[in-house]
């Protein structure tokens, strides 16, 4: 299924990210949604066992209608058409009730489709209540209907619980990824806006004096050109020097736009942690770090804070700086230092600079990324 806006208490794969439906998460949701069609197929085995003739044809047609309703629910969810979503879910439930006399106890496996779809659109404590009721129905209904086998009831109840948990966990992971993408996009926007403001401020501060001086000296040189050409020439040489310096200042101001700097990464990281709901304990001063190490330490801060937001489930993140080391530490779930393109790339960058990188569980809990610069 798809995914949609996030609600307290989470959701399932039927929730749609209406603003981002083409990413890998969306394709994985769609694949999981199509996998849910195995449940109507299993119900078809019950129809074949307990019905014949016109009843057999009717049972198969009803299951086709159930599958069509389910696919329509997926589409409605992807397009955030929630009123149609509920009507389609009600229709699928009614079709499941109609197929029950033809499939007997096998029809109860459809509860494993209906319950997750309903849980996707409810909040608070209603979701676990629906799961419990669905599992109870799988166990209890066969005992109340004469001629139905009670054996599969427990299996179907487990299927309901397992499917609901599966899609809920999958959806929460997708939701976390979406929130991280949104946070990173917002941080990038804020960083870009801050950088534009910085460049505008720097250009104003750098060029204001130079351009004013150039204007004044050019005017003076024009006035001196007729009566004092030597003085006019000296003024024009001064204008040339000022122009060259102004050009160098502009290049210096603009060239820092794409550089990774320790100051910039600390500023961006503080905003990223704030957007992710993680308390940030980041240094406000970095003057003690030698200039030749600030870019490397900026890369460490960038990778470390990104991993905290993406993987740690932390409540607090701390960055400690010294003249020769930087450490990013969180109080999250910890775990071994796995392989990944970001961490591998950082290892290569640190090794090229002659430093040492260590990453792994921290005490008493959490995870630590530490880089020691070369002496």
Image (cartoon, rainbow, N blue to C red):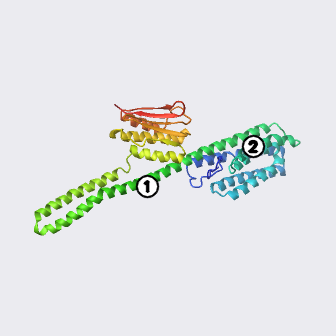
Nearer the observer, 282 or 348 = 282
From the viewer's perspective, tell me whether residue 40 is left or right of residue 219: right
Query: Residue at 70% of width from left, 58% of height from top?
Result: 84
The circle on residue 151 is none
Q: Is residue 341 visible?
A: no
- Coordinates of residue 262 in the picture (x, y in percent): 39, 43
Tag 1 residue: 193
Quick one: quadrant of the C terminus?
A: top left
- Left of 105 or right of it: where is 253? left
Q: Nearer the viewer, mark 2 or mark 1?
A: 1
Is 367 displayed left or right of 144 in the figure? Answer: left
Element type at mark 2: helix
Residue 119 pos. (x, y %): 70, 48
First along the sequence among labels 2 and 1: 2
- Within the image, what quadrant is residue 244 found in? bottom left
Above or below: residue 222 compared with residue 60: below
């Amino acid at each position: 299924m798809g995914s949609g806006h996030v609600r307290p208490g989470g959701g399932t794969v039927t929730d749609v990210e209406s603003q981002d439906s083409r990413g890998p998460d969306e394709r994985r949701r769609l694949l999981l949604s199509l996998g849910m069609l195995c449940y109507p197929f299993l119900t078809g085995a019950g129809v074949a066992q307990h019905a014949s003739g016109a009843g057999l044809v009717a049972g198969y047609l009803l299951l086709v209608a159930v599958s069509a309703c389910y696919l329509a629910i997926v589409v409605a969810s992807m397009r955030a058409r929630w009123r149609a979503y509920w009507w389609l879910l009600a229709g699928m439930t009614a079709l499941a009730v109609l197929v029950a006399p033809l499939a007997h106890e096998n029809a109860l496996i459809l509860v494993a489709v209906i319950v997750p779809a309903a849980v996707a659109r409810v909040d608070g404590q209603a979701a676990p209540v629906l799961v419990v009721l669905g599992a109870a129905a799988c166990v209890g209904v066969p005992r109340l209907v004469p001629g139905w086998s009670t054996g599969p009831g427990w299996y179907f109840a487990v299927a309901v619980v397992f499917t609901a948990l599966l899609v809920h966990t999958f959806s929460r992971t997708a939701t976390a990824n979406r929130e991280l993408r949104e946070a990173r996009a917002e941080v990038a926007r804020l960083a870009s806006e801050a950088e534009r403001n910085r460049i505008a401020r720097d250009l104003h501060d750098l060029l204001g004096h130079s351009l004013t001086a150039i204007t004044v000296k050019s005017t003076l040189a024009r006035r001196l050109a007729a009566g004092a050409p030597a003085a006019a020439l000296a003024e024009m040489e001064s204008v040339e020097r000022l122009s060259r310096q102004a050009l160098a200042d502009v290049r210096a101001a603009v060239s820092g736009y794409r550089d990774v700097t320790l100051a910039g990464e600390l500023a961006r990281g503080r905003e990223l942690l704030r957007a992710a709901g993680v308390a940030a304990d980041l240094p406000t001063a970095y003057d003690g770090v030698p200039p030749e190490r600030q870019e490397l330490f900026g890369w460490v801060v960038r990778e470390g804070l990104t991993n905290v937001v993406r993987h740690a489930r932390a409540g607090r993140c701390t960055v400690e700086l010294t003249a020769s080391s930087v450490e990013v530490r969180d109080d999250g779930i910890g775990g071994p230092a796995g392989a990944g393109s970001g961490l591998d790339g950082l290892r290569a960058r640190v090794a090229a600079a002659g430093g040492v990188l260590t990453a792994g569980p921290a005490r008493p809990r959490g995870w630590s990324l530490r880089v020691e610069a070369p002496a």
